[in-house]
Amino acid sequence: MATTFGGFLFFVSACAAGPDGGSIHIEAVNLLDHQQSSLEASPTEIPGPGWETQGNAVLERSTTVSTDGEASLRVEGSEYDPVHTDDSGTIRIATSTATSGVRVHPGTIYAGWLDVMSRSGASPVRCELRWYDRDGAILRTDEGREVTERPSRWRTPICLGRAPTGASYAALRLHVANSGPGDVHYVDNAWLIAASPEPTDQTAGVSTTVPQKSVAPPTTQPSTTQPPAPQPSTTQAPESSAPPSSEMPGVAPVASGVRPTSSNTGPTVSSPKKIGKVEVFAGQDVTISDVITDQIVVHGGGKLTATNVRVNSSVVVLPESGVAKTKLHLDNALVTNGLTINTIDGSGNLHWGPAVPVDIKVSNSWIRHPQGSGTDHTEALAAFGYTSGAMFINDTFIQDGPFNGTATATINWHGDNTTFDGCYFGWNGQTAAWFTVYVEGTNNVVRNSHLEAARAGYIYPDSTPPATYNNNTDPQTGNPVTR
């Protein structure tokens, strides 16, 4: 069963779906209304704040900080919550609940996320999806991975889940632990999307169009109150997008140590065969070479060796806990719409438990992601859930700009024991993000690599735990890049 939560490349598989799913990309339609998402209206205005207390909290609009628009939701721990109080030391809030919630479809996978910040505290926070039946009774709550706040820095917890049998409505919730009366947290930029295609239902009140587009929620985004850093100058010509497949000439494989580009990667024959989508399932061992493919998807337990290939959209890998090791060996590849690795459990939810060993080696390849639409988040390489043992050798990762607030970095990596060696992390069409790389997990290393400057810095400073950075430089200035 497969579910892709594609780095939020949300793609959904025929067997399952998660915030990424099965062989198509889906448009990120926010099922929350604008007020619930952006919190721009004051509580006295219609439709009001769009959020409810669920325990130990009072809510009000604030214009002190925000990540979307000018306002956010101020959440204060309180013993006078009109809905519920207890001594659990937790704060709970939610978008409209029960039969006032978002219409959902059983079996569809949904993803939610929101920005949350405390000015001084460091409470564990998580995103949750709560499901209700047609009468508004609670069916289940799916909890996302807990993250710890950083004082005065926005964090973005993510939650994913499949709507259970009998579900008709859902609410997006925030759970804050170790937080008592008087503690203040801010919430903004909330999202709830269908990460696998919903069946057509005119009563749902939302678009179910499924165009070819990928989406990627952030891990963390700097506050919009931060002044933009001056954009670095560049003496290097921007990467061009790959030529149309009908004009693709044969190229020699990239030599070790030569920087992969859109013109020196891909098929080495003059008339490569077009083979459509390549999808590899558990127990299958597939080899392809010198071909053009629409998309590559490797499910948990599948094995794929691909050399000298052009991928017209994305590469998606779905390692799964409890199944055979998933293999992707990708060499001399041209990937035009990003590489996503999402580790899942047997139910198709993102796996944030012990890291799942993988046999992933990507080498001598050019991997790019186009600019986000202005609402979705993107990166050339994204990985959610935890893998262990992936290797990236002499690869180029390019995120298209210019900056519009939707790119997390060139790469957004969660995993353990990962090696990036001799890689290039850069931009096309101006700088696209605040930071160049985001790498989080145990025993990760980035070495011998080139990092083009971003708006605020090269390395996201609050990854926990951070990677080790050795012998990295800025390709324009030659200056060393250190954490």
Image (cartoon, rainbow, N blue to C red):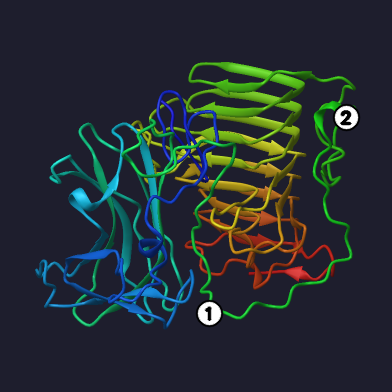
Local crowd at mark 2 within 10 Å, few (<14), some, or many (≥20)?
few
Count of picture labels: 2
Q: Which residue is mark 2?
A: 247
Looking at the rendered structure, which numbered label has been put on residue 225? 1
Q: Residue 390, can we see it?
A: no
Question: 202 and 29: which one is in front?
Answer: 202
Question: 405 and 471: which one is in front?
Answer: 405
Cβ–Cβ under 8 Å for marks 1 and 2: no
Earlier residue among tags 1 and 2 = 1
SS at mark 2 in the image: helix
Residue at horizontal 66 percent and vertical 55 percent from the top: 410
Q: Is residue 293 above or below residue 387?
A: above
Local crowd at mark 1 within 10 Å, few (<14), some, or many (≥20)?
few
Q: Is residue 386 above or below residue 244?
A: below
Q: Is residue 325 above or below residue 42?
A: above
Q: Position of residue 123 (x, y in %)?
A: 31, 70
Question: 231 and 318: which one is in front?
Answer: 231
Q: Position of residue 209 (x, y in %)?
A: 49, 37
Q: Position of residue 399 (x, y in %)?
A: 69, 53
Looking at the rendered structure, which numbered label has been put on residue 239? none
Q: Residue 397, can we see it?
A: yes
Question: 26 and 289: which one is in front?
Answer: 26
Name the amino acid, label 2.
Glu
Name the amino acid, label 1.
Thr
Residue at horizontal 42 percent and vertical 73 percent from the top: 150
SS at mark 1 in the image: loop
Placement of the C terminus among the 4 image quadrants: bottom right
Question: Seen in the image, is 426 located left or right of residue 22?
Answer: right
Task: State the separation of the CA atoms marked 1 and 2.
Answer: 46 Å
Placement of the N terminus among the 4 image quadrants: top left
Residue at horizontal 43 percent and vertical 40 percent from the top: 195
